[in-house]
Amino acid sequence: MVTVAGEGPVDRRVPGLAIDAVEPPDRQELEGAIADADLVVAENICSLPLNRAASQAVAAALRGRRAVLHHHDLPWQRPRLAATQGFPPDDPAWAHVTINELSRRQLVERHFAATTIYNCFDTDEPPGDRAKARAVVDDTDDERLLLQPTRAIARKNVPAGLALAEALDATYWILGPAEEGYGPELERLLARSKVRTIHGNPGLTGADLYAAADAVALPSTWEGFGNATVESAIHRRPLAVGDYPVARELAAFGFCWFPAHDPGPMRAWLEDPDPALLDDNQALARRHFSLDVLVDQLGRLLEANTRP
């Protein structure tokens, strides 16, 4: 497997593919980067017009080639992009794959054939180092810590995460960077918080981050999937979830979560934990969202998509 992107730790870089690239990717450079590939997986680049020139260049380079267009988000799911025309592009040689059934149905309504393959994870990842992670963020083990493992943008609903932390009397830790101009609002919210706040990841692994937490918050108003729904189950942490549409879809697998808008149930559980909830959630994650499940689903997709 070879990775290609405009930036970051990848095998081959084509600068014009970066989301903030000023110039479009060089056509010869792009085609050369994928020339020896038997199958190309386009990760969201042909889904949202965040760098329209790059999206169009990738679509042109893939015409007639066997490819999977992996859609995390689609333009009509974002208010500022809803009027965009021509996305996603299509070709008889391509397979469209979504990370949720909602998006698949929306594509079908727009006359695209699509398959849902949910995000999958290493469900046997060993537990992280709680003591190390707590020491890094200067939290003692008797302090309650609420982890929000998301970026800081409006739809991640930081105010709800902070309100939950305050109700639980917990340190609030949001991991990801502030994006889409949300930085000043995040600074204002954190400065006004009544509890201790932490922003960013000081080099800890995902397992360490979850080990450090007593509970996890995903209060988002929209997620294409919401990895914390499964990651919290793998790492045996209770989760408070916002009522975003795909969360309802994932909850149908049987997960037991707490409402992000009502701290009472989460607070009661933390005061008298029931390990059976964590056992059940972990078992569901292993049954439905493991890497073995992913391999099986991809195999069936590629067998069905045998067009050259």
Image (cartoon, rainbow, N blue to C red):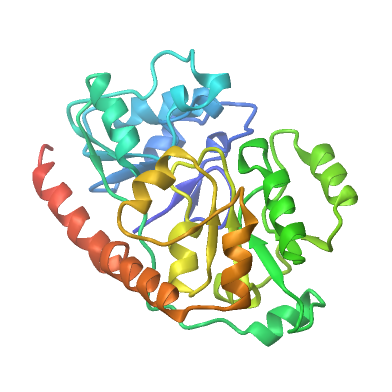
x 61%, y 51%: residue? 262
x and y percentages locating residue 213 in the rendered image: 64, 72
- Residue at left offset 40%, top offset 78%: 276
Residue 200 visible somewhere in the drawing: no
Front in this rendered view, residue 164 or 108: 164
In the depicted structure, whether residue 235 falls above or below residue 305:
below
Residue 100, picture quadrant: top left
Residue at 68% in and 46% down: 160
User: Quadrant of residue 106 in the image?
Assistant: top left
Outermost residue, right side: 191
Asked whether residue 298 appears in the rendered view, the answer is yes
| Residue 238 picture location, percent across and down | 53, 68
Front residue of this view, candidates 13 and 302? 302
| Position of residue 99 measured from the top left corner of the image (x, y, whole percent) | 35, 45
Residue 40 locus on image (x, y percent): 30, 44
Q: Relative to 186, is 83 on the left or the right? A: left
Q: Is residue 68 above or below residue 232?
A: above
